Amino acid sequence: MKAIAEPRRRELLSLLRDDGAQSVGELSDKVVVTQQAVSLHLKVLEEAGLVEARKEGTRHIYAVKPEGFKPIQEFVAAFWSGHLSELKSTLERK
């Protein structure tokens, strides 16, 4: 959660989700920070298990790692389960 709390990292994740795997250079062309800053943000995301990198020659290509979002998804889903059960009970009573 801490890794995605930073707005620039969420922006990078959105770009990778929407446009697919990209290099640091490609990503830095689309955001208003330096290549070095993009690299640092991607390192945090990679350490959190949210993106993965593969090497192509001298470039690192980053992609979203969907399974890394499972803990976040489970955390958020826990808030919904109680509410959905309440809604179901209410609807069944009517």
Image: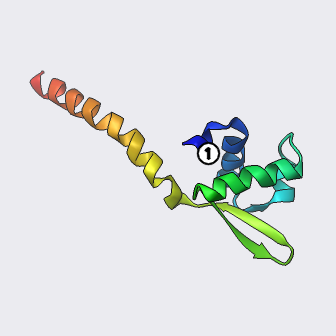
Front position in the image: 91 or 23: 23
Q: How is the image coloured?
A: rainbow
Taking the image as shown, residue 51 lies to the left or right of residue 15, namely: left
Q: Which residue is mark 1?
A: 3
Looking at the figure, which quarter contains the N terminus? top right
Q: Circle 1 sits in a helix, a strand or a loop, which is it?
A: helix
> How many badges with numbers are in the image?
1
How far across and how far down the image is residue 46, in percent?
65, 59
- Residue at 86 percent across and 42 percent down: it is 33
Q: Residue at x 82, y 58 (%)?
A: 24
On screen, residue 11 above or below 40: above
In this picture, residue 31 sits left or right of residue 77? right
- The quarter of the rendered structure image containing the C terminus is top left
* 27 or 40, nearer to the observer: 40
Q: Residues within 10 Å of mark 1 (few under 14, many from 20)?
A: some
Residue found at the very far top of the displayed protein: 94
Name which residue lies at 52% across and 57% down: 68
Position of residue 46 in the picture relative to residue 41 (left or right): left
In the rendered image of this protein, does residue 67 appear above or below residue 55?
A: above
Q: Residue furthest bottom?
A: 57
Residue 34: image x %, image y %? 89, 46
Amino acid type of the residue that numbered disc 1 sits on in the rendered structure: Ala
The structure residue drawn at horizontal position 67% and vertical position 46%, both measured from the top left corner, is: 14
**Image location (x, y in percent) of residue 86:** 21, 28
Q: What percent of the width, then of the height, locates residue 28? A: 85, 50
